[in-house]
Image (spheres, rainbow, N blue to C red):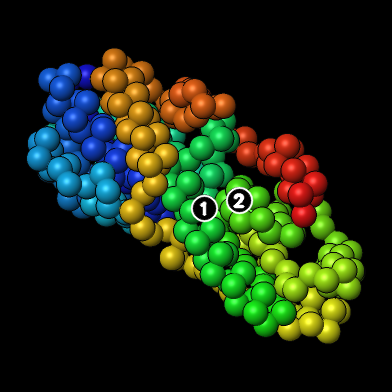
Amino acid sequence: LKSIGVLTSGGDSPGMNAALRAVVRTALFEGVKVWGIYNGYRGLLDEEMEEMTSRSVSDIIQRGGTILGTARCKRFMTEEGRMQAYENMKKRGIEGLVIIGGDGSLRGATQLSLETGVPIVGLPGTIDNDVWGTDYTIGCDTAANTIIDAINKLRDTASSHNRIAVVEVMGRHCGWLAMLAGIAGGAEFILVPEEEYNLDDICSGIIKSYEQGRRYSLIVVAEGVGSSLDIGKYIEEKTNMDVRVSVLGHIQRGGSPSVRDRVKASQLGEKAALALIAGQSDVVFGFNQGKVVAIDLHDAITNKKHMNDEFIRLAKQLN
Ligand code: ATP
């Protein structure tokens, strides 16, 4: 391919800029034109795009969010919308796309490729770590670090007041982020949608640990489990202890990307650009046990990600 486009879509995540920078610089190095498309699929429809130079991606590797902007776009969910997007690409000679986004964005990409034959390479850009076939998504490491920072602070105050701290973290239907942050933050209990739990057992566990001299408890709850406020209320009533619930919210999406996110996003960005230029399509690049892997785009969107059993075991073992 001689001219490609790149966009970020869905929820932003720290490291998207590092991936974008790698895509742009790799393409330019290969002598291929690269178009930056603003605001996800909406920009493709509204023709918000421009040709990128090496300078367009200067001074961005350290920034959170995405300099291209991102959006959720209803029109792209229709075939008519996707045909319009295709026409807008053709007008500029854009022959293929790198899509950096979550599972919804990859689903949209599959539709576009299916209907128009446009070559698509995807990169998993989401803090949720919910994409099948890869044990890493761009931004999940920074988000986990942000959560750890919050957990450390909540621990200080929970221990001073002899309280139970319940921390709700993001991840949509997926418990990976909660599991990673819970293990790293030394949580006593980690509630994820992939694993059944019994609140009564948790309450008796807490009471027992207090009797043995524990001063506070920390429980990490994945948003996919349900309302952490309800969970906190139930625990308060059952244990007769002071509970404070903190819903961390969008703070988890921001911040300067970690070393791990910058490096991995750069590796994935390079791979994506090279694959697309070489004419590959319908593939998502991710990591498996430390190595870059190519995942079939269709598999990535149809399979449901499993929780790592080893993490579940470890979390229980260490609590
Ligand atoms: P995150 O998981 O971080 O929130 P995401 O990529 O899953 O990111 P979505 O809002 O699900 O975020 O999807 C982003 C955009 O992708 C949608 O606004 C829509 O334009 C497009 N999209 C999602 N699903 C489809 C689909 N089935 N067909 C066509 N386009 C889709």
Which amino acid does the dot numbered 1 rest on? Ala
Residue 193 in view: yes
Quick check: 205 above or below 66?
below
For the C terminus, give its image quadrant.
Answer: bottom right
Quick check: 56 above or below 185?
above
Sequence-wise, the earlier of marks 1 and 2 is 1
Real-space Cα separation, disc 1 to disc 2, in angstroms:
8 Å
Image position of 52 (left or right of 38): left
Residue plotted at (74% across, 60% down): 188
Q: Position of residue 242 (x, y in %)?
A: 73, 83
For the N terminus, give its image quadrant.
Answer: top left
On the image, which quarter does residue 274 sit in?
Answer: top left
Q: How many marks?
A: 2
Looking at the rendered structure, which numbered label has been put on residue 144? 1
Query: Which sits in the foreground, 73 or 272?
Result: 272
Image position of 57 (left or right of 200): left
Looking at the rendered structure, which numbered label has been put on residue 184? 2
Q: Nearer the viewer, mark 1 or mark 2?
A: 2
Which amino acid does the dot numbered 2 rest on? Ala
State yes or no: discs 1 and 2 in contact (Cβ < 8 Å): yes
Residue 73 in view: no
Image position of 292 (left or right of 72): right
Residue plotted at (44% across, 34% down): 110
On the image, which quarter does residue 83 sit in?
Answer: top left
Query: Which sits in the foreground, 20 or 38?
Result: 20
* Residue farthest toward the top in the current orientation of the protein: 278
* Label 1 Cα neighbours within 10 Å, binned few <14 / some 14-19 / many ≥20: many
Residue plotted at (72% across, 79% down): 162
Q: Position of residue 293 (x, y in %)?
A: 48, 23
Query: Which sits in the foreground, 288 or 164?
Result: 164
* Label 2 Cα neighbours within 10 Å, binned few <14 / some 14-19 / many ≥20: some
